[in-house]
């Protein structure tokens, strides 16, 4: 626990506008970045980010001051994204097809690889996508991801390993990366981290 975290939360609970602004500014870019990557739509991410901060301020009294604040904040963001994705899965999305209609081919393979990588991440199961994004794009350690998702560290490592294999397999199928020699192929059935 950080004494700075506890002091900031106490000030927020007293409706100190500077503390509220400080808390939002401290976590806004990470929460928004996570939402963009998990939801793949900027407008959805903006909406969910607002919901996350509303939820944070409604729930501050329940934060355990013996624990770090950041994983707690990120767990709220992950849960709001999960809810949003489950609601979105029930309604059709025409916007998903817009990027497929682009007539221009990328100028080089790196732009195409980035598009394929984003598509591969988007196709992952939600929990795999969350772990992949939190680890590789947000730079979160296993322990913080485990706390944010309320899962054991071993589960997080397994999900991350499986996510990496699925992303790599899609990139191989799409001709974006070369096949490894047979002896160097990853074992999808192994549950541990690479």
Image (cartoon, grey):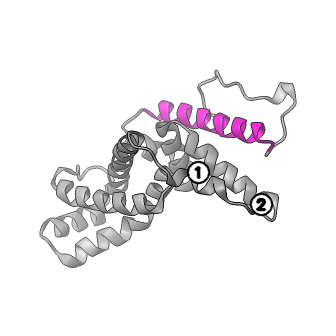
Q: Residue at x 84, y 35 (%)?
A: 179
Q: Is residue 162 magenta?
A: yes
The magenta segment: 152-175
Measured from the top left, where is residue 156 in percent x and y?
Answer: 49, 36
**Residue 150 falls left or right of residue 182:** left
Q: Is residue 184 magenta?
A: no
Measured from the top left, where is residue 61 in percent x and y?
Answer: 15, 54
1 or 2: mark nearer the eye: 2
> Which badge, 1 or 2, comes first in the chain's sequence?
2
Q: Does the CB distance between marks 1 and 2 fall below 8 Å?
A: no
Q: Main secondary structure of the magenta part?
A: helix
Badge number at residue 136: 1
Badge number at residue 105: 2
Viewport quadrant of the N terminus = bottom left
Q: Secondary structure at mark 1?
A: helix
Is residue 64 visible to us here? yes
Residue at the extreme bottom of the image, as rendered: 18
Q: Quick one: 105 or 33, which is closer to the camera?
A: 105
Q: Residue at x 78, y 29 (%)?
A: 185
């Amino acid at each position: 626990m950080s004494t700075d975290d506890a002091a900031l939360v106490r000030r927020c609970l007293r409706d100190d506008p500077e503390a509220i602004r400080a808390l939002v500014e401290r976590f806004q870019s990470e929460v928004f970045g996570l939402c963009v990557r998990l939801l793949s739509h900027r407008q959805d991410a903006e909406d969910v980010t607002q919901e996350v901060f509303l939820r944070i301020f409604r729930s501050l009294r329940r934060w355990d001051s013996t624990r770090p604040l950041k994983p707690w904040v990120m767990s709220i963001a992950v849960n709001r994204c999960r809810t949003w994705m489950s609601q979105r899965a029930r309604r059709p999305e025409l916007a998903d097809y817009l990027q497929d209609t682009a007539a221009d081919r990328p100028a080089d393979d790196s732009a195409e690889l980035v598009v394929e990588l984003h598509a591969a991440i988007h196709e992952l199961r939600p929990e795999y996508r969350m772990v992949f994004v939190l680890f590789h794009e947000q730079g979160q350690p296993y322990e913080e991801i485990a706390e944010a998702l309320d899962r054991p560290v071993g589960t997080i490592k397994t999900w991350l390993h499986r996510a990496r294999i699925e992303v790599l397999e899609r990139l191989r199928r799409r001709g974006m990366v070369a096949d490894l020699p047979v002896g160097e192929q990853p074992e999808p059935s192994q549950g541990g981290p690479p």
